[in-house]
Amino acid sequence: MEQPKIVQNFGRNLRFKPSHTYSPINKDELIDILEKHKSGKIRVVASKHSWSGLIETEDVLINMSHFDYVKIQENNHETSVTVGAGCKVKKLLADLNRKGLTIPSVGLIDQQTIAGATATGTHGSGKHSLSHYIESLQLACFDENGKSAQIVDINEGVALQAARCSLGCLGVVVEMTLSCIPQYFVQEKATFCDTIEEVLILEKKAPLQQFFLMPHSWKFFAQERLVSLELRRRGFAAIYRIYWFLIIDLGMHLMMKLIVSILRSRRLVHTFFRFIVPSLVFHNWLVTDRSDRALVMKHELFRHLELEAFVVRSQVVEAASFVKDILQYADDGNHQLSDSTIELIQKVQLFDSLSSIKGCFTHHYPICFRRIMPDDTLISMASGVSEDWYAISFITYVEPRDEFYALATFLANSMFELFQARIHWGKWFPQTSDHVNQLYPKIDTFRDVCYRYDPNGVFRNSFVEDKLGF
Ligand SMILES: Cc1cc2nc3c(=O)[nH]c(=O)nc-3n(C[C@H](O)[C@H](O)[C@H](O)COP(=O)(O)OP(=O)(O)OC[C@H]3O[C@@H](n4cnc5c(N)ncnc54)[C@H](O)[C@@H]3O)c2cc1C
């Protein structure tokens, strides 16, 4: 056992001190820990990048960082990789790349562990979420009476669907096997559009694209992305990476931090997004780079907090127009809402809570839209329907965060009522168990699988008890 310390997450919105902290070095040690604490409460922590209350515990906290191996195998001409739960995505990508391989999906950063990323349905590159690609998984959990700890292999049926995105509720993931694919290169080009309809048309030729609604200019900026037929860097890719790191990852974020945290000027935020940010982007720079370089950025450099709402494709145009109107209203209490937004708010009777966000918060970060294909899981955000999803992200760099929380709560509630929006499990999570019960048709099955591997609820903290309605 290690000396328990105060734990803080990346966003510093969570702070707690567990009574016991462990970093087991092998499976025997892990089983001993589970046996010792079988009448207590256990949670697993990984890179602490989640903003929701998933990792919190006052009792036992386990860190699986010693389980960071990567084993590549071939079976019937299919290549897969078995990876220790505590392995960071960055290491997994590097090890696979040495063999000319990669995984089919990554998030915007590569600092998460593979178990942490999949436990919350992390997504990011225009494909399914990472969870979808888990072929099998090894879990440390309890037997059907909850009396003894055991290690089980899960490789089919609803148990696998539940374990792919489990929020840590089934037990401690020891390792998982994921499908992998040959390394590929991504061609990218930056394009500005006036409407979301124009951006969505681009998606036909750039299926991996992500796009941003730029606050205060309210134009769209698309990163048109497609799989390149060539397996080499082109378009001065190395210089592009340096430009992106210095100008966007560092420069743009530093300027924004200065404006929103130190100068605290609403007018400068407007000027920044209307005139400065568009001038930082090189239009039409056609660049081709390896997937693990092209699809990630250094978004972890500056502390922030995020809410991300998932809507199905058929709702994304209406949702984007609603979001734009609401953010304008939050920025300027005199903003005249459009007739369609007024009609929507009337329909769901949210006029009272709308008044609480009037002029309360100036949004200061591009609103990112990313496509996710439907997942074969029980409760990842992109599960349960055959349509593609779009994740719409709202990020703040301002602290204290009370005004953002008010706006984010309004967005989560109104978008639930209007578009059946699901909130990312790993991000700031204001939805209630009532919402969750309505949004996830397979939530009952998920709870049943949890009872099977953890009959006494040892692996549940108050966040999952509350949100999943155990
Ligand atoms: C800068 C930044 C960028 C991000 N970008 C994206 C993005 O592009 N796309 C996206 O979808 N999300 C993104 N996220 C969210 C992030 O991917 C998720 O919150 C992810 O869960 C974090 O992984 P982690 O390793 O930090 O896990 P933690 O936050 O430490 O834990 C997350 C969950 O995993 C569980 N867990 C971890 N290990 C195990 C294990 N071995 N067994 C059982 N349960 C386990 C924990 O109990 C917890 O429930 C981002 C977050 C940050 C801070």
Image: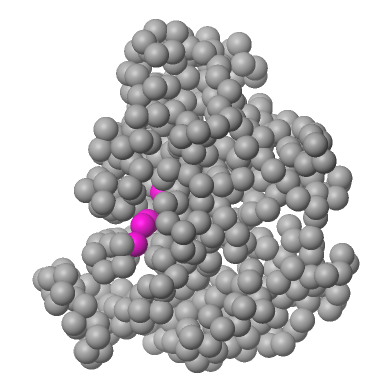
Q: Is residue 137 magenta?
A: no
Using the rendered image of the protein, determine whether residue 393 is visible from the camera's viewpoint.
no
- Residue closest to the eye, 116 or 264: 116
Q: Is residue 422 magenta?
A: yes
Span of residues in magenta: 421-426
Quarter placement of the C terminus: top left
- Residue at 70% across / 80% down in the picture? 189
- Residue closest to the eye, 383 or 172: 383
Residue 307: % across, % down = 39, 60
Residue 156: % across, % down = 55, 32
Residue 257: % across, % down = 50, 70
Instruction: Assign the magenta stretch its main secondary structure.
Output: loop
- Residue at 75% across / 84% down in the picture? 285
Using the rendered image of the protein, determine whether residue 325 is visible from the camera's viewpoint.
yes
From this view, report whether residue 164 is shown above or below residue 375: above
- Residue closest to the eye, 62 or 19: 62
- Residue at 35% across / 35% down in the picture? 445
- The part of the image, by quadrant, that contains residue 224 is bottom right
- Residue closest to the eye, 149 or 379: 379
Q: Is residue 200 left or right of residue 20?
A: right
From this view, report whether residue 40 is shown above or below residue 369: above
Q: Is residue 379 left or right of residue 336?
A: right
